[in-house]
Amino acid sequence: MMAPLASRAEKLKQGKALRRRIPRESHAGSKDLRTRDAVAILAESDADRVPELIPERYTRMTANPFAFLRGAAAVMAEDLREHPMVGIPVQAGGDSHLMNFGAFVTPEDNILFDVNDFDETLPGVDFTVDLKRLAASVAVAALSAEASKKRARALAASTAAAYREHMLALSNLSPMEIWHSRVDLEQELKVIESRPLRRKLTAVIATARGSGLDKDDNFPNLVRGKEARIADKPPTIFHLDAHGDAKHRLDAERVFGLYRQVLSPERLRLLERYQLKDLVFKAVGVGSVGTFCCAGLFMSGDDEPLFLQVKQAQRSVLERLGGELAYNGNEGQRVVEGQRMMQSANDIFLGWTEDIDTGRQFYVRVLKNRRLGGVSDLAETESLEDYARLCGRTLARAHARSGDPASIAGYLGKSSAMDDALATFALSYAAQTVIDHAALVKAKGAAVDAKAAG
């Protein structure tokens, strides 16, 4: 006979009891990071990237400490390896940077706000890992916008509080209610105090209603003619050389053939109403620059386009945390499973595949620009706090789908103890990020000088 499931009240007590083993204040500390080499950690993944795009990756990361942090998920995962873990696992996003949240339009025409990046997602990870990365990114964003350290710390604390408060609210819902909970962007307008952010969100909603949210300057341009094709826009969008070496080649027919095998029958039936017409390489993100990523143009019989992204999935940086976190299987499948677990409304074309000749593994999704907007703009308009709190609530909702919200709420409590600890950590990590950014700038500058001298 199976043991009865614990009640919410019992789980709250269990979470609270964990404070004796891992005090909330212990999350404020950070180990001495002077002995580790952030630049070397970043370089570990270069061997598996397209060589010509590696300089572009570092160019983007050297822009400022905020851009550096966005591309340095591996560095932060390494740094968190010896941090205190509460012992409440969730499906972690792995890269809960402020820029990895965004707006979505669902098939029902609802406009949602949700987690937007799952390249590093992994199950069984302590909930504090994502929360610390989010808090750190808030502090770095604030300092990059020339806010004071006091203000940056306060913003990180406010973000943690938003997560804590929303997790407590979710803990009072049934599992089914939690699963179906969403962060509706139009509803969020009612609780956001910042007028600039309300105006920005209103504009996003209006754009989405007009079907304009999907495109930006880096979205492929469709050229219609005798045969539809994608316009080249080097160095970020360009056609592959069919006769190039393995690092510059993709067997599209085979890759999409394997992808079709993992689609459910109704989604496969929908895809069959389109035909692949063109394929280009498309550089993406900051940390992802140089990984193999393509955009495929599919057309219906009436010349209606569908763009699908095929993006390389590497091992999650969260495996650096150790323990039993190694994922065995197709890395693209890992990304898809994580996205389905965390997001409230999923892309119907999510799937995974591989290129057997090169050994690369991929996930497939509809190609969209889902980012809400530049965080620097939000900070400049004094909207960062409301935006960061929105991200905190969103992360809580995503964690509650796979984790135990009552246990997390019990550990976090109703006081600001955890908020303060995370704020202290965030400010300390922001200072370290400035040091690491400077080290990367110096290293890349030295490399350029050496190349010129040679």
Image: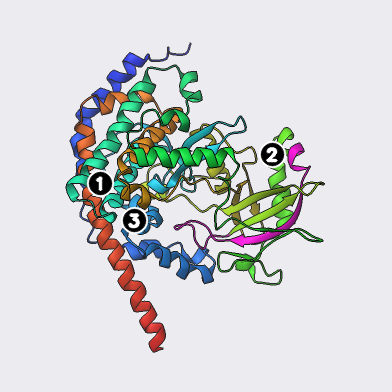
For the residue carrying disc 3, how many other residues have a C-alpha within 10 Å: few (<14), some (14-19), or many (20+)? many
Magenta residues, as a range? 269-292
The percent position of residue 61, horizontal first and vertical second, equals 39, 62
Residue at image position (73%, 54%) is 254
Residue at image position (48%, 43%) is 116
Provide the residue designation for mark 1: 426
Provide the residue designation for mark 2: 263
Q: Does the magenta stretch include residue 270?
A: yes
> Which amino acid, mark 1?
Ala
Q: In this view, does 81 lie to the left or right of 220?
A: left
Q: Which label sits on residue 293?
A: none
Which numbered disc flags the more N-terminal residue, 2 or 3? 3
The percent position of residue 417, horizontal first and vertical second, equals 19, 32
Which of these two is toward me, 26 or 182? Answer: 182
Question: SS for tag 1?
Answer: helix
Residue at image position (37%, 36%) is 390
Q: Which label sits on residue 66?
A: 3
Q: Does the magenta stretch include residue 178?
A: no
Q: Is residue 57 left or right of residue 161?
A: right
For the residue carrying disc 2, how many other residues have a C-alpha within 10 Å: few (<14), some (14-19), or many (20+)? some
The percent position of residue 345, horizontal first and vertical second, equals 55, 33
Count of labels in the image: 3
Toward the bottom, the furthest residue is 454
Label 1 vs label 2, nearer the camera: 1
The answer to whether residue 244 shows anywhere in this view is yes
Which numbered disc flags the more N-terminal residue, 1 or 3? 3
Question: SS for tag 2?
Answer: loop
Which of these two is toward me, 293 or 357? Answer: 293
Label 2 vs label 3, nearer the camera: 3
